[in-house]
Image: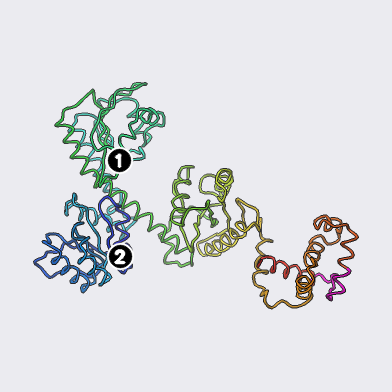
């Protein structure tokens, strides 16, 4: 399911801006082009595009009809969408109102939105997914190559190759390496960065010529691809030298068309990512055979890992941070989701990226420079039905790591079962209703400013080792023995009974945890 605000987030601020957030939970099923001369507003759940509206009165009337027809939202040109009367109407009817930037045609908006909606409806379908857009990108690369009569690559703003033209007659080793590796080689990026190419791409909309370089790098005509001021990517053509103004103008026009394709590709990828996160989140929360079919996981057994990040990041930022970190270190398909305020990963017990061994080493290395980077792994899950319990263990263990009650930065439940057992027992105790000798000692410490509870705790922790207990308390061993005799006079104790010793330790731990 995708809502109108989701669509805006997926496409990005280059084209749309949410002016009023309505109910926010209505699914967008299709796009409907409203005619101001007709009363129809499509089917319930349609995102209505208000084209051909003359003024704010037309816009207000359209919004009222859309609210009555249970539309999922309305898209208007920015000037109308920000009109006070229009905004007030949308707020009154709790209808999502979206502003469209003035430079985009309605035809392109329909094409873009329907592609994203189709992707959301069938996230695993190559017909509605990335494959169709990639084919169009290759066609655009061929069209650009025909314009400039030179080999062309289309790259995103991370120097990843999205498409390339079929003509290979006039090329150089850098272009071959770029196509084979699906991204610009690191040494070539360093060369272009040193010449200020990427700074210019990030700021400029005008095509420019890059001179030849070392190791046979031939000149290139570079055309920035932008939408709404946002740099999305670029067209790179291997040329012999300067090209005519007519060619650069045509390439700039091609870049405008390419910008919409890149927006659609990014939006579809974002929708697919959100869909995958939603499905994984559902499986981690509660096992259901109906929802596990579409979750793509490696071969079991798995472990759920609760991840902690340095301070200053909210949960969506933490999720993005862990995804980018995982990919950067070789995890090609990170299995990540956020649930109840915690970022979770599903890893395997094998070796290599995406395994617990790999993630543990990564977290230990990251924590050296980024304190707060932590990971806690739950028990093994041999099937989807075991994932929720593994998640619960991981979250519980991460809480102990953050409180300093368990060693970090990376810990597995198999190594901390005793800590979890004590923690569960301690947290089940009601410290407001303590009874027995500990309650007597607590009252005595408060009334007489003594430290008998601390003394008893050290004695129990180092049972049979009075020298170690005395050292912990910075006391002489005879002083410790005297205090223990005094404790026996104040409260009735039988420290020869192992169950009484265990009960006292749990009560003391509960009191210390509370404070």
Is residue 20 shown above or below 13?
below
Residue at disc 2, secondary structure: loop
Identify the magenta region. 485-499
**Position of 273 compared to 100: left or right?**
right
Mark 2 or mark 1: whose residue is earlier in sequence: 2
Is 185 or 208 nearer to us in this picture?
208
Residue 236 magenta-drawn? Answer: no
Quadrant the N terminus occupies: bottom left
**235 up-or-down from 34: above or below:** above
Q: Residue at x 26, y 67 (%)?
A: 72
Residue 503 position within the rendered picture, expressed as x and y whole percent measured from the top left: 75, 71
Quick one: SS at disc 1?
A: strand
Residue furthest out toward the right: 478
Q: Position of residue 336 (x, y in %)?
A: 46, 54
447 on left or right of 338: right
The residue indicated by pointer 1 is 233
| Screen quadrant of the C terminus | bottom right
What is the crowding at mark 1: few (fewer than 14 residues within 10 Å), some, or many (at least 20)?
many
């Amino acid at each position: 399911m995708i809502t109108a605000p989701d669509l805006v987030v997926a496409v990005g601020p280059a084209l749309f801006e949410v002016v009023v957030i309505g109910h926010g939970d209505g699914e967008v099923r299709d796009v409907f082009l409203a005619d101001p001369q007709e009363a129809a507003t499509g089917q319930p759940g349609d995102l209505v595009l208000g084209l051909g509206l003359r003024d704010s009165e037309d816009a207000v009337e359209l919004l009222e009809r859309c609210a009555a027809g249970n539309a999922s939202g309305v898209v208007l040109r920015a000037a109308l969408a920000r009109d006070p009367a229009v905004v007030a109407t949308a707020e009154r009817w709790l209808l999502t109102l979206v502003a469209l930037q003035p430079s985009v045609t309605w035809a392109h908006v329909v094409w873009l939105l329907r592609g994203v909606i189709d992707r959301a409806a069938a996230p695993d379908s190559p017909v509605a997914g990335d494959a169709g857009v990639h084919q169009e990108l290759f066609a655009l690369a061929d069209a650009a190559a025909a314009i400039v009569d030179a080999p062309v690559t289309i790259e995103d703003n991370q120097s990843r190759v999205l498409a390339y033209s079929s003509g290979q007659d006039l090329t150089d080793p850098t272009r071959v390496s770029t196509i084979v590796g699906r991204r610009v080689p690191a040494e070539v990026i360093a060369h272009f960065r040193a010449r200020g190419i990427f700074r210019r791409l990030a700021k400029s909309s005008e095509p420019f010529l890059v001179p030849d370089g070392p190791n046979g790098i031939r000149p290139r005509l570079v055309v920035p691809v932008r939408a709404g001021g946002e740099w999305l990517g670029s067209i790179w053509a291997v040329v012999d030298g300067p090209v005519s103004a007519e060619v650069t103008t045509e390439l700039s026009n091609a870049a405008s068309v390419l910008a919409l394709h890149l927006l659609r590709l990014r939006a579809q990828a974002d929708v697919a990512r959100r869909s995958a996160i939603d499905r994984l989140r559902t499986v981690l929360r509660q096992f259901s055979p109906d929802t596990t079919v579409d979750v793509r996981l490696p071969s079991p057994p798995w472990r759920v890992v609760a991840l902690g990040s340095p301070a200053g990041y909210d949960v969506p930022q933490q999720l993005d941070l862990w995804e980018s970190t995982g990919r950067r270190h070789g995890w090609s398909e990170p299995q990540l989701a956020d649930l109840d305020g915690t970022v979770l990963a599903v890893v395997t017990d094998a070796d290599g990226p995406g395994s617990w061994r790999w993630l543990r080493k990564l977290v230990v290395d990251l924590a050296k420079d980024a304190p707060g980077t932590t990971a806690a792994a739950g028990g093994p899950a041999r099937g989807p039905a075991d994932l929720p319990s593994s998640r619960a263990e991981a979250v519980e263990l991460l809480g102990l790591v953050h409180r300093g009650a368990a060693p970090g930065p990376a810990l597995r439940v198999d190594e901390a079962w005793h800590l979890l057992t004590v923690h569960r027992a301690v947290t089940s105790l009601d410290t407001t209703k303590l009874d027995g000798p500990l309650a007597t000692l607590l009252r005595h410490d408060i009334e007489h400013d003594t430290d008998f509870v601390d003394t008893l705790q050290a004695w129990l922790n180092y049972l049979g080792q009075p020298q170690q207990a005395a050292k912990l308390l910075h006391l002489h061993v005879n002083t410790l023995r005297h205090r223990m005799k005094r404790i026996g006079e104040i409260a009735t104790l039988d420290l020869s009974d192992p169950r009484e010793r265990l009960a006292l330790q749990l009560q003391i731990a509960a009191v210390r945890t509370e404070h």
